[in-house]
Amino acid sequence: MLAESISEIGLGHFLVLSMILFITGMLGVLLRKNILTVLMSIELMLNAINLSFVAYARSLNQLDGQIIVFFIMTIAAAEAGVGLALVVAVFKRFKEVNIRFFEHLKG
Amino acid sequence: MTNEYFIAIMLLSPLVGFLINGIFGRGRWGGYTSGAIATFFALTSFASAAYLVFGLTELADGPRIISATFFDWITVDELKIPARFVVDPISAIMVLVVTGVGTLIHLFSIGYMHEDRGVTKYFSYLNFFLFNMLVLVTGDSLPIMFVGWEGVGLASYLLIGFWFNDEEKATAGMKAFITNRIGDAAFIIGMFILFFHFGTLEFEKINSLVPVGPTLSWLSPLTLGTLLLFIGATGKSAQIPLYVWLPDAMAGPTPVSALIHAATMVTAGVYMIVRLSFLFAAAPYTLMVIAIIGALTVVLAATIGLAQWDIKKVLAYSTVSQLGYMFLACGVGAFGAALFHLMTHAFFKALMFLGSGSVIHGMHHEQDMRRMGGLKKYLPITYFTFLAGWLAIIGMPPFAGFFSKDEILWQSFSSSNGHWIFWAIGVLGATLTSFYMTRLMALTFWGQERFDKKHHHPHESPYSMLIPLIALAVLSIVGGWLGIPHVISEVLPAHPANVLEHWLEGSLVHPIAATAVDGGHADHAALEWGLMGLSVGLALLSAVTAYVFYIVKPEIPKLLVQKLGQAYELVFNKYYVDEIYQRYILNPLVKASEDLWLYVDVRIIDKLTYVLTDMSIGTGKMSKAMQTGNIQTYALYIVMGVAIILTIFFGV
Amino acid sequence: MTAEVFLFWFLAIVTVVSALGVLFMPNPIYSAFSLIMTMIGVSALFALLGAYFLAGVQVIVYAGAVLVLFVMVMMLFDLKSEIKAFTKGTLGGVFKIGSVAVLAGLILSAIMVTTQGVAIKFQGQADFGMQPTRLLGNKLFTQYVIIFEILGALLLVVAVGAVALSRSKGGTHARRID
């Protein structure tokens, strides 16, 4: 069973890998202090999801999964753009990129 | 189809005037502009009303009716109330009186009110009143009538308290409104009972469902419903026990007293009973109550009127008393006579109020008759028109009041529902009326000039005020000729027909039927002549007495006051009715409300709400801690939420 | 052990290790480089799954564009290695890690349930009829054209928004710096 699951690769392998990447990204979002790292962790999570989509596309023999990945990439790029602009704004004011400066946004 | 348009124009043009003056006029237009606008729309309404009534006369016999259904107002299960308005012989009279007298009073108001600061507001209210009054009289179901009923109540409140800076006047407005509320509550309950019983509130459908024979039971829905409606009428038409607001309502501008509190609104109760004559005729017990209340009101109000010094108060009590006559007529089943008196009363009482308004205007807002006298020299036209009104109200032939009052007296004597006691009370009332009205004439226009000539320079009013007076004076003279009784017309050379009776034929129900009028015509004629002569004679005698008292020997009244002492005090203080109400009804009510406030509201309801607010504040404090502002904490919430949702997915 | 299997394991190790690098590197620059590594690994995995076009886009867009942006921003800031890479609060950290662990367990069990113990094999070669890239383009400009256009508009908005944000004088409405 174990040997088989090492020597033969299936959908499950890719999903588990995707899950590990996703969890890592999630921990980065939750724990890192630097906003830039947090943004990078978000990218990581998006990539993990992309991976599972592509794996499903391969498994189900349908291209639509890949198209969704394409769209997600676009969204990710947009998110990175806006996020970095915000980071720049925060840095301009506080000369530091600690995530807790966003606490000031609380009403 | 055109009739529908004309009904719409008649109803809506005062509303349009109200909106124009109310929205655009404030602080911008003077009295002449807004007065002209308001009068124009009232006149438009009158013109279309006249056209409609003319169209009504052209209609062939049978159910003469012009109606317009605009839309379905309420449709709930069984309850269907179309917004239907009718002009039939009964409402035709009212429509003409309301719009006609209304227009004249609008015109009068221009002269009377044009200097007032709130004149635009005044005219918009006046138009608003007219609209509601028309809804009241033309509405073809009880709820529609009630809409108008409430609307005129509102207009009345607004106009009584028109000078709301004066606390007394504002209070008078509230008193009128609240007293009317009592009656209105009864009206609504009566409406519910009738709906329970008949399953409909439209007049025609109720008419077809009314049982043929009289209902001889106090507890039958018919008797109860009509009694409650009558209580509503006592509120609006100022009868015992709810008449107390009307004298106070004189706080409003005098044209308002003329229009609302003499000619039109206060007759709404009488009109309602006449309108529902088919219903009331089937409830003899209710009729009996109405007759008794009416008769009592006649005498009570007339006696109070004897001792008042304020010219408007005298007229107010006179109005209450005259309304009593109308109810007496309804009570003995003479609905036509009630409507007749309603009409003539609208003419001569509006005339007298406007006349008093002219006097007050000429005397620079002096209302106390003790500081008047001898005014006929200064106000000749007002004097002569007032003279016509006076002769009409004391019932001198051939003035209008004679015919209508005589018809009521004769019917209360002769009809099967009548009784000679009613007649006797009516004659007593007429005698008293004659006395206090002559007293009013004597104190105001005749005798010595008792006002301070340095401060008062009585002057005749402008033409805009005199024209309505003259028009109403003419109507007060000829208005009664519409209903000349048979006994008189037989003697007259041209044998003029009783136009009004013919007009209302078929529209009204006569519980008196065949028993009284037919048979022994000659005997009745002799009797009728005799009674007529007696009442006129007594009125004349009483007028002469009053003349003697107040002109020839002014010391007699003072002597009488000293002699009568306590009795005079009683009458002068209006039988202490207000005080009794205050002590035995209002004060306990206030006390009970205070107790309810202190014990139920503060201790139970407020406590309950405090508990609820404390709870929500506590919850808020708890959830406040969650909103840290830290983004990573929020992200944690998302993670936890996803975890919980997934757990639920797997769990199920 | 075919080449495919070997490649998968190799790439899996590379991506996971570099992902952990993103998580733990105290200096953001190192995190960024680790992320580039992950991206390239993922791109290779895409290629392994037959998505050649996406593999190329991944390298160009992520490694080429997004991460260059990140690095440039960092150069702008002149950041130093941080002494503490993670936010304060032991209790909060425990909570966060615990929740993530629970979630990981749940996802893992979901994967196990749906794939019957990772046993589902891919059926032969990926067969998309025409060349996959061509077909992808076809679909993108026919079936999904509206979404495509909307995303184009979104990118424009984002470009404008990003410029507007970075041109602002900076900071929030808060006056206090604590």
Image: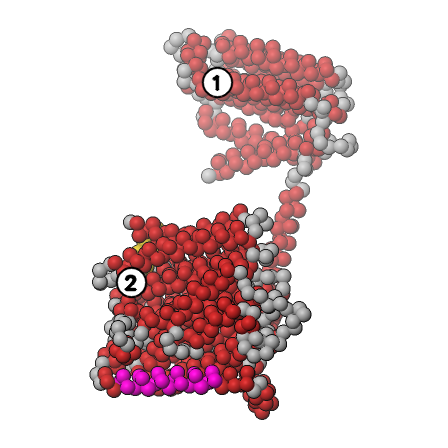
Q: Would you name the residue on which mark 2 appears?
A: B204
The CA span between labels 1 and 2 is 68 Å
**Observer-nearest residue: B458 or B617?**
B458
Which chain is mark 2 on?
B
Q: Position of residue B276 (x, y in %)?
A: 33, 68
Q: Residue at x 39, y 63 (%)?
A: B97
Q: Which residue is mark 1?
A: C149
Q: Residue at x 44, y 86 (%)?
A: B541
Label 1 close to label 2 by CB (< 8 Å): no
Query: What colouring style does the render use?
Result: secondary structure
Tell me if residue A8 comes above or below residue B218 in the rendering.
above
Secondary element type, mark 2? helix
Tell me, yes or no, if residue B288 can be seen here: no
For this view, does B248 lie left or right of residue B433? right
Main SS of residues in magenta: helix
Residue B339 falls within the magenta-colored stretch: no
Region in magenta = B524-544
Q: Amino acid at mark 2?
A: Glu
Residue C127 located left or right of residue B313: left
Q: Quadrant of the C terminus of chain A?
A: top right
Question: In the image, is residue B182 above or below residue B533?
Answer: above
